[in-house]
Amino acid sequence: MPLLKLSKKFTANMAIMACIAIAARRNGRHMTATAFCVANSSTASTTSAFSRKSFSFLGTTSRALSSSASSITALGSTATVEEIDLAAVTEHPSYEIVDRDIVTEYGAHCTMYRHKKTGAELLSVKNDDDNKVFGITFRTPPTDSSGVPHVLEHSVLCGSRKYTTKEPFVQLLQGSLQTFLNAMTYPDRTCYVLASQNDKDFKNLVNVYADAVFHPRATSDPDVHAQEGWHLELEDKDEPLTYKGVVYNEMKGVYSSPDSRLYRQSQRSIFPDNTYSVDSGGDPKVIPGLSFEDFKDFHAKFYHPANSRIFFWGDDNVLERLELMDEYLSEFDASPESKPGSVVEWQKKTITEPRWETHPYPVGADQPETNMVMVNWLMNDSAFTPAEDLVVGVLDHLLMGTGQSVLYKTLMESGLGSAITGGGLSDELLQATFSVGLKGVEAENTKAVQELVLTTLNKVLEEGFSDEEIASAMNTIEFRLREFNTGSYPKGLSFMLGAMSKWIYDGKPTDALKFEEPLAELKEKISQNGDGVFKDFLKEYLVQNMHRVTVELAPSRTLEQDELNDEVSRLAAIKDSLSDDELDEVIKQTTELKALQASEDAPEDRATIPSLELADLKREVSEYPIEVNVDEKSGVTVIRHELASTSGIAYVSFAVDASGVAYEDVPLLSLFTRIMTETGAGDYSDVQLSQRIGTHTGGVGAGLLKTTVSPDGVPSGAIYEGNNMITKLTVGGKATSDKTDELFSIFKLVLTESNLDSKKKVIEMLKETKSRLESSIQGSGHSYANNRIKARYSVGGYLDEKMGGISYLNTINSVLKDAEEDWGSVLARLENIRSAILNKTTCRNGMMLDITGDKAVMDAIQPSVDAFLESLPGDVDGDKLPDFYNTEHPWVIKAKAEMATMAPVQDEGFVVPTQVSYVGKGGVLFEDGEKVSGSTAVVSRYLRTGYLWDHVRVIGGAYGGFCTFNPMGGDGVFTFLSYRDPNLAKTIDVYDATADALLEAAEELEKNPDALATAIIGTFGDLDGALSPDQKGTKAFNRWLIRQTAEERQAFRDEILNTKASDFKDFAMRLKNMKKPSVAVVSSKAGFEAAAKDGKVMELKTVV
């Protein structure tokens, strides 16, 4: 089950922006909810009160507010009361209407129904969004760390009364047009959520989910509990017993992460008396104590309609919503005890003297023995009002919202540690907490970290916040709220998660979504009392709040082995306690479970799963507007995307060519782009620049765009050598149309005058990057294994790995050493990068300005565009850059020379402290000049959601098993990957057997056209996600940049639609004959030793 990541910014309880958080991530400020694993899952770790979700309440401030107020009011609300007809309410005899409301901020007409027979609550939100959303949430507070809500969340989707296959969830993934399909376990609730733009598909999905939660197979079949939760496994009496289970292995991966250990210990310490003191995701030491009876009882207690909150969003028929759910709800009677029995009790502030706790965490043999420290507060023990929610959220932004916020900046600049932990406010749960600290702390400095946090807060209380700080924070937050940009995630999902932050605790759901009144109230308070409103909260909830626990994690080189030995000992003791007959029974159960897992669903069971038909598919590719011109005065290429509406916002990206950057400096480009916006520029300090960006825009950032392009003459869909690339350094941002002058001014400022000579700041950045990389390799080893494999076969893959893979960690260590000992050499390299991208004679020729906006925006900003283009550096009539579509990129020559020695085609193992493995294998399927059909997208997806799901996840017990292949990527490389895998050698064997399994599948598909159609339909679902306005512009730009035509896109789509069973056979033969296969694995030393005994020997390298 992938863990759904939600992150940074702040999650005020009025939290409408939940999904933005899923996409965003910064430092340790992440909120994660345990979620059911989709086949291409990536990272995850269970939710805690200290994890984060990012919402934003955004407002403008009074005294310094006048400058930014116009920017925000230009956005306005999404809808007005007049646009929504309150009288148009739908009635149904099985429901009573409890409340009707309008969230004018988002044009949402909300009706709260209560099912008369059961008491189930249903919030129906009607609007014109075709990306329809359904969710059903149960309050599920656990009393121990057996992980029962987490195991149940997995298990209910493994078959039900009406839908009788082993895993309907997988069948839905295989053949649905869903735009979101997942489930999430929080510390106190479990959510099942889906979305689709297709009406028929949406109803199918709702039916499957509703039957799953109310009538799961799992409560009558212990095999589901064994598979998803835990079981003893034994195939031979002479072998040792082992624990297996998807959740069990997932949580072993979670507990391998030092960050996860820190958050878990912090949550437990600050909530000693309520449900948050235990781990809803499950502690691997406790999970094997979860019996089937306890598992079944938990479902009976909490999964009654009376304890449910049901949510609908979109343009579907409201009466049909009510009818559909009534079919399920009406089977149940009232259960007056269900809701009271799930109430989450408030944790009172019982800690009157702050505490300090120390716990161990595992480090590798070559890893520095540094500590982690986090100071944690329980903020409130009674409910905040919506206005107070907003105050706390803005206060958090003032303290921790950016790298230049006072508390964040003070900690990072202290030199006491390498990276921030905690990240500030978390208000995802019933009570808000505030957590902050540092990792990479020397043992003698741990107390100093706590002291610095406390003295900084006291100093802020004494000195207060400036008008500029308040204006910037308020504008930033208000911009996000009004924009309501959830990216590719459904807006309805954001709305639901926001509503749930009040609703799940028996509050009014729409109170969590309205921000106009609290915003106006806060602005009024600021106008009267300035920063006093924030200082009052800082004093009451942090400075004078004694319910505080500081958690320290101390390094242990033996903990990983100690925990492994403990597990081995426990299992040995269990085995010793079993009689021969009991051991025979374990062996029998192991054999039977594996046989069940490997068996195919019967045709009659498959027939119970509702499906679409090929005729339901949209045959045409979605195209987005684009107009490209070369500005005659400036010589800059201007790309425009005029959409129907962007709510008054201009989304802008400016690019300069980076091909002139010296090859040896390429790994510094990510550091350089970060410096551009974080160290100050021109006359602006880092703080002043951050405040200017926050006050006048919706955000500004810099990055690197690198894409391989095909030369002239290469047929569409053909593999090409990869010698041709477009490389651009980009500066992007967004602002309301009346603020684009400021936006463009900031673009030019950071591009030409960023403060490169900032030794202390750069060293902080490098240390932070090093810390993040080390944590990421441990927790997301599959992505690094994937990068490492691809680096062996193509220049583009090698450069990706060099700039962000495992080898990048070595680069960071080297640059950090140079920065500390020879700053002048690092500064010279940074200055050389800027000189290269702003080369006077060529830079104009390589510049691009990409703009997305509606017609009103485009017209309004044109004078700003003209002025910006005229002000740019470089000669208008300067030299032309090479045609990189047909000329080898200068980085390619040196990269090719390095690849043989730096990324040889060999099996590699990367050693980290972990209890699980991330197993990758790959190679070349298509060589230069060969044509790749769209059918390969169908086949690779079929493997991902079928064979690999079954054998790596279900049978093998890994958290995820999947594969990657990009039919339009041009490199022809295919990779297998696993995530949080208890196996290593066995998983490689599964990969090696894929071709034969696919050949068998091809024969079956010849006989079963419906199964083939299902595979095609699911692939179409991947093509047609809902996009935000800025994403539409970006998609159109990227298509243009790689010179992909609408005709090519349509041909690719047609190839998918016309996939035949023979295409599966052809793909299987390519897998059998994969060129130059190789392995990359992230695992523990013990894992590699065991794999070597099974004949899987690799070249080992210790990473952390």
Image (cartoon, grey):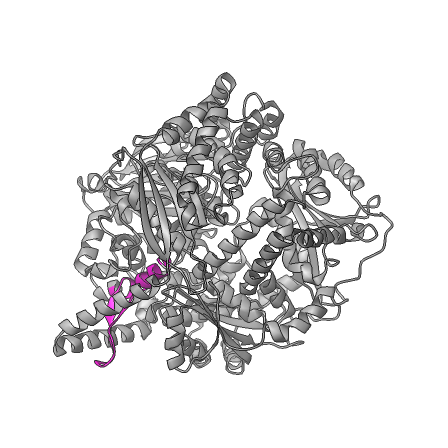
Residue 234 horizontal side relative to residue 738, left or right: left
Q: Residue furthest top?
A: 528
Let me know if residue 1043 appears in the view.
no
Q: Position of residue 484 (x, y in %)?
A: 51, 39
Q: Closest to the observer: 966 or 166?
A: 966
In depth, the one of 903 and 729 nearer the eye is: 903
Q: Seen from this angle, which residue lies furthest front?
A: 444
Q: Who's the residue at 23% across and 69% down the image?
A: 569
In the rendered image, the residue lying farthest to the right is 877
Q: Is residue 101 magenta?
A: no
In this rendered view, identify the residue nearer to me: 686 or 411: 411
In this rendering, is residue 180 above or below 695? Answer: below
| Magenta region, residue range | 226-255
Q: Position of residue 564 (x, y in %)?
A: 30, 66
Q: Quadrant of residue 1070?
A: bottom right
Determine the residue positioned at 85% across, 55% down: 879
User: What residue appears at the point 48 percent right and 51 percent down from the top-left corner?
Assistant: 197
Residue 752 drawn at (x, y percent): 73, 44
Which image quarter is the N terminus in?
bottom left
Q: Position of residue 436 (x, y in %)?
A: 42, 41
Total count of labels: 0
712 vs 758: above or below: below
991 vs 29: above or below: below
Query: Is residue 448 something that shows in the picture?
Result: yes
Left or right relative to 155: residue 437: right
Answer left or right for 712 relative to 172: right
Vertical arrangement, residue 614 with respect to residue 378, above or below: below
